Amino acid sequence: MTHRIDRTARGFLFDMDGTLVDSTAIVEAAWGSFGADHDIDPVTILAFSHGRQTIDTVTHFLPHLTGDERVAVAHALVADEVQRTADLSGGGGDGGIVEIDGAAAFVRSLEDLGVPVALVTSAPRDLAVSRMQAAGVPVPDVVVTAEDVPRGKPAPDCYLQAAELLGLDPADCIAFEDAPAGVESAVASGAQVVVVGDLSSPVTEGLDRLPGYVGVEVTRDSDGRVRVTG
């Protein structure tokens, strides 16, 4: 049988937005408001911001602000997204937050096998946890967020730290990503990378990809590694 993916690993590293959780409506609304406030095309903002820390996006588009001013703008943006998440939690796809197809079941299957799992996101911790809970996706014990690393994606820091916290070499981990900055980060860390969704760019060339997690199976090999097929 031919699989789209057939890999073995000891640990699993997941990006959040676009990889486990679909929060498109909230992200577009928040950055749309930011674009309107600063006369910047939201499409341009979204093309840059996906997978990156909020402060990095603010710095990119508002370089004339002081450091403190940029931090204040970033904090306000995150607070706006947290509130929008709370307002739309349980939206069931009606403008709310939902899982990427099969994500919750896939993460639970890994947890049931006792496999080390980490969430690796550019979102702040409160926002990450609230979005995962709203989508019904289990929050792993290991969570690496914007506050935890000196450099955000596309730097590899977050994936390197997540693998270290799992007690694993990055090469023994599979990282699931959907954004250019995130894919670049995961590749640079040395992890095995699987692209979730339809992202197509030079950084994805030669990488495995999945449209979602429905039909993806995990089993333990004789040496204790976990085989992922789908």
Image: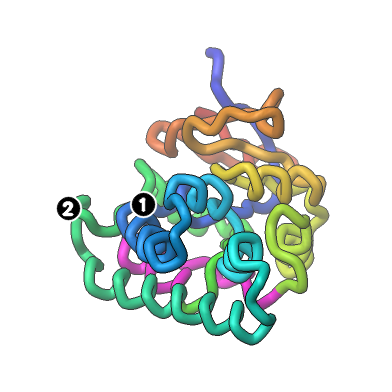
Residue 161: percent from the left, percent from the top? 76, 66
As for residue 218 lying within the magenta part, the answer is: no
Sequence-wise first label, 2 or 1: 1
Answer above or below: position of 228 versus 111.
above
Q: Tell me the residue at 44%/55% (across/down).
A: 108
Seen in the image, is 57 located left or right of residue 29? right
Q: Say what secondary structure mark 2 lies in.
A: loop
Answer above or below: position of 111 versus 226.
below
Given residues 128 and 6, the one toward you in this image is 128
Cα distance between the residues tagged 2 and 1: 12 Å
Seen in the image, is 169 located left or right of residue 183? right
Q: Say what secondary structure mark 1 lies in.
A: helix
Q: Which residues are magenta?
A: 127-148
Q: Tell me the residue at 58%/36% (across/down).
A: 195
The mark found on residue 24 in the picture is 1
Seen in the image, is 3 located left or right of residue 206? left
User: Where does label 2 land, which residue?
Assistant: 94
Residue 18: percent from the left, percent from the top? 46, 48
Given residues 180 and 65, the one toward you in this image is 65
Whether residue 197 is visible, yes or no, is: yes
Residue 175: percent from the left, percent from the top? 65, 47
Q: Residues within 10 Å of mark 2 (few under 14, many from 20)?
A: few
* Furthest residue toward top: 1
Answer above or below: position of 98 versus 54.
above
